[in-house]
Image (cartoon, rainbow, N blue to C red):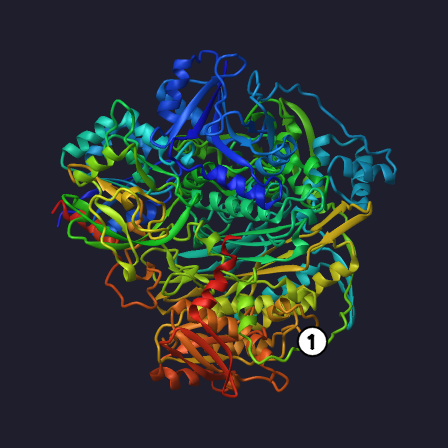
Amino acid sequence: MVRPRILILRAPGTNCDAETAHAFDLAGGLTDKLHVNRVLENVGLLSEFQVLCIPGGFSYGDDIAAGRIFGGQIRHHLAETLTAFREAGKLIIGICNGFQVLLKTNLLAAGDAAGPTATLAANDSGHFEARWVRLSTQPGNCAFLNGIQELELPVAHGEGRFVTRDDDVFDRMNGSGKFVLRYAAPAQTAIKISQFAIAPTVPYPANPNGALGDVAGMCDESGRVFGLMPHPERFVDWMQHPRWTREPARPAGDGLRIFQNAVRYFN
Amino acid sequence: MLWEIDIHPAEGQLDRVAERVATAAREFGLANDLRVASARGYLVEGDALDRAKIEKLAAELLVDSVVERANIRQLSATEGQADGGALNGAKCVTVLLKPGVMDPVAQSALAAAADVGVQPTAMATARKYWLSGASEAEILSVGSKLLANDAIEQVFIGALELERLELGRPYRFESRNTPIRQLDDAALMRLSRESQLYLQLAEMQTIQKHFRELDREPTDVELETIAQTWSEHCSHKTLAGRISYTDENGERRFENMLKETIFAATTAIRERLGADDWCVSVFEDNAGIVRFDDEFNVAFKVETHNHPSALEPYGGANTGVGGVIRDIMGTGMGAKPICSTDVFCFARPDTPASELPPGTLHPRRVMHGVVEGVRDYGNRMGIPTVNGAVYFDQRYLGNPLVYCGNVGLIPRDKSFKQAEPGDLIVAVGGRTGRDGIHGATFSSAELTSQSEHISGGAVQIGNAIEEKKVLDVLLVARDRGLFNAVTDCGAGGFSSAVGEMGEKIGAEVHLDRAPLKYEGLSYTEIWISEAQERMVLAVPEKNWRAIDDLCRSEGVEATVIGRFVPSGRLHLYYRDNCVADLEMRFLHKGRPPVVRKATYSASQSRPLSLPSKENYTDDLLRILASPNVASKEWIVRQYDHEVQGGSVVKPFVGVANDGPSDAAVLRPVLGSRRGIVIGCGMNPRYGDFDPYHMAASAIDEALRNCVAVGADPARVAILDNFCWGDCERPETLGGLVRAALACHDVSIALGAPFISGKDSLNNEFSYQGNDGARHTIAIPPSLLISAIGQVEDVARCVTMDLKKSGNLIYIVGESRNELGGSHFALVNDLSGGDVPTVDPETARRTFAALHRAIASGLVRACHDLSEGGLAAAVAEMAFAGGLGAQIAADRVPRTSDADHAAAILFSESNTRFVCEVEAASAAAFEKCFQDQTECRQIGAVQSSSTLEIQLEARPIISASLNELKQSWKAFMHA
């Protein structure tokens, strides 16, 4: 098996780098953690890696807004490098703060003359939310979600409410299959998610932030750039599940499959 | 030029901030029909900034145009109008930080502005509100009581008019002496008070004598250094002092009370363990350290940050968390923080605003501010907050308590440190500002209604990301062996950090070399500033280049400010002027012993007359709904409790993830199954009866919480945090000594060593009442016991939720008629009775037996019995598991005086658990307890959705799970 090299890109305030590296290691990747300053000094470093991961945390304190400063650094200094990275058939994943960062670059949702088209705004509850959610997928060509229909994962964020600039943008993104991951209702009250739903259809707290269309994660057209608010790296082992003492054991945590997909992509 | 950028929610976006203000104004009775709009604002200053540049800055950096819109205005020009958002014509209120208060967002924005090609010279953040539907007077009171805190913020009403952002002004050096040699006693005490030294007469006289011998006056910074080193906060002089204690057994004299009670217990346990001693470092370093596995030790410390949190709840709690994390970072050669625990004591949040004494903040505001402060620091640091508790009592009105704890993981060979002569003194992290001046001495004083004004400078705002950056480089530098010692700048700032590290060597520090946030700080301010996020390293000269390079590579500032020199003296310089020359010996050993009297007289015990009732369902529902017992999920879900990926037993468990866990379990080493267990015990209500039994009960509770989830009781270490009233009163100190005696006795009996502790005395609040008289509110005796346990294989851990119908329900331990201080007494407004006591020998056997049962996989669920007793515990287990239960109260093992239904149901006797056991395991389970303690099957899990408890075949409690859970959750959004 080929063990792809994974770059975990750190910034000041990144705080999920260790467990994210652990998840990739478990999945069979070879991980390195690098501070963004090293990459800014030498963008050539990226060429040694097959997967770029921007992990969770509070990059630059999330000062001004979540992911704003780190996202700006990438937009101003690394946009071309990352576009080339994707075009070379490599994978990029942003988890939680990483998703917030990716959305501020043009890799997931390109802006237009009128400015950015989508954002992750403050949760409807008005504060940080740490809780477990159920997720359903529409994987399409998303390399990370290949073969995954549903997942249980924890969320932990204050700014995760996916919003588009207007309904047209939402419909366009939805139509092109970008919304690959959505919050789902609790198992007992499963309701069918409308393909074209705009307003949240899953009530709080199952949709923990009030995201439009219950969007929890999105993918670009290539299927190789993926951003999500939930934390797959926090559920790679069954004993991380909140009900592991009462439910039938699963061989691994649901989140591990996302990392395994990334590794398998190169095999 | 100074520009103002207001950022409003865009059309169609909710204005949550405004909603919260309007709700709070109504709830506090400040204004009933207030309409509010809010905006975030930035003030941007720079000579070359035109409108186009500001618009670019707004569009590309500051505003999210999908959900926000900006209004830009040049201040000090007529151009542009402040935009009232949805409420044009309303009164505009702008809240700005006072000059010198930390503004991390502005700092980050200023740094990031360069990326968009705009370079302001200064930035500041602002909050803006537009208020209507209220009178001018109401708006003023909303402004000062709700929108801003006078300790750190200033309010401008109307359009903002400012010429420029006020930063520092240049400082002109002037060496200052404080004449002391000629002062009489009254003048000495006046100096102590007015200079905020808060030293006692004997101490002032000792200093006077010292300088008379030196034949000179002290400099201002010398006096400050002595006051800080000798402060209660830094030296714990009362509890480590001479105490003559009298109680019903006569008089006992202590040379060093702590040493002869709490430390002595640890020493006895370590001697008993001999070669198996698993304590590594106790009561020496910033935190206690115990063995974890072959590779790592764990460090644990709990601090309080009460006084700052009383004045500025958000900033106080925020820096409380930041401070205890730095304690862990500064333990040994630096530990990696792996989880936090936070315990709060507040007055009830539904206290009518009219009952507030002057100078206090509303407890609801305190509670929300504290929760948010803890949340924002812990979450940003990426440290899971896994455990905690909240207690409510009206005596916390003037003195809320905020206990912040942190656990660290440290390689075994990095657990000790020693600065060497010749090492450079290196300051790492945040810059020094005028924040937190006099925190160490202030926290040792009593709060008054004037404190807000006297001590505004003691209040700080944290910047978690600065600390995270320091942590990232610190651990790398530690593993590369680049320094010999590290400590944090906590209370007392450089003075305390350098003073401690150099105590046995000597040090010289050049204060002008410390990097400053802004100009204008005097050498004294630099020395005693408690600016956050700073660490001090002792670095061999040959490693300086490597440390500097490492720090630079991650954007952390490191500066050589001096050197440890083998002089035995502390020399401070400012631009080559010597401003202090103190003997280390005098500084650290010169303080005269504090001698105190302590008395304890038992309060008259009164019987509690129990009501005779047919049915106790309503009592149970009211206990579940009472603030101390009720769900704290609204708090816990704001804390990231799973970051770092080690979470095994979460704060909330059960079928709907909302049942209250007894303790948290986590795996600090990913990939290993060895776990850390964190629990706590506290019950201030018991202290009103007898502090001895309160302390014993708190230890028992902390241990049983840990044991209930699977911790090995032979490997639990504990911490003491005493928060008490004014200990110059013999009876107040007497209660504390009595609690310490219990700590000694129970710790030894249970084999649970104390490894670290802290005290916060003088938690009293005095004010002038409407009647013109002076009133004082003293907090109840508040001892928090925090416990850190270990579990060999986390796969053996159990949670408290009922798992499967048909399983058997057991009670472990004996129930006694101990309803004194209970929640049954609380909700029924009953007084008197006997407070729960601990039989340590039974407790030790019970914990060991239960651990054998859990480790053998015989227990499906386990919950400890605490507030609300058996009934509350079974109810919580049932609704957490979504399964009913049938209980026969007759079967509960009890003493002969505990036959009353209320005693069986609600007594809070210690050392008891409820366990769920599969029928097939019943015999093996019972065998674990044979000859050890009481253990009896009292019922079974049912597939129904009701809890029924019977006595003599009649139901005395009968409630649906839904009803029980709703009551327990009703307090949630208080």
Callout 1 crowding tier (Cα within 10 Å): few <14, some 14–19, many ≥20:
some
SS at circle 1? loop
Q: Is residue B901 above or below residue A181?
A: below
Q: Is residue B178 visible?
A: yes
User: Whole-percent x and y of residue B400?
Assistant: 63, 50
Q: Residue B779, located in which quarter of the rendered image?
A: bottom right
Out of B356 and B329, give the one closest to the viewer. B356
User: Whole-percent x and y of residue B97?
Assistant: 57, 30
Out of B33 and B492, give the one closest to the viewer. B33
Q: Which residue, given by chain and number where applicable, does mark 1 sit on?
A: B608
Q: Is residue B407 visible?
A: no
User: Whole-percent x and y of residue B442?
Assistant: 69, 42
| B227 on left or right of B6 | right
Q: Is residue B524 above or below residue B650?
A: above
Given the image, on which type of amino acid does mark 1 rest? Leu
Q: Residue A122, located in which quarter of the rendered image?
A: top left
User: Whole-percent x and y of residue B703?
Assistant: 52, 68
| A260 on left or right of B960 | left
Out of B523 and B397, give the one closest to the viewer. B397
| B740 on left or right of A96 | right
Q: Is residue B258 above or below residue B133?
A: below
User: Disc 1 is attached to a residue of which chain?
Assistant: B
- Image point 64% across, 62% down: which residue? B684
How many marks overall? 1
Out of B772 and B315, give the one closest to the viewer. B772
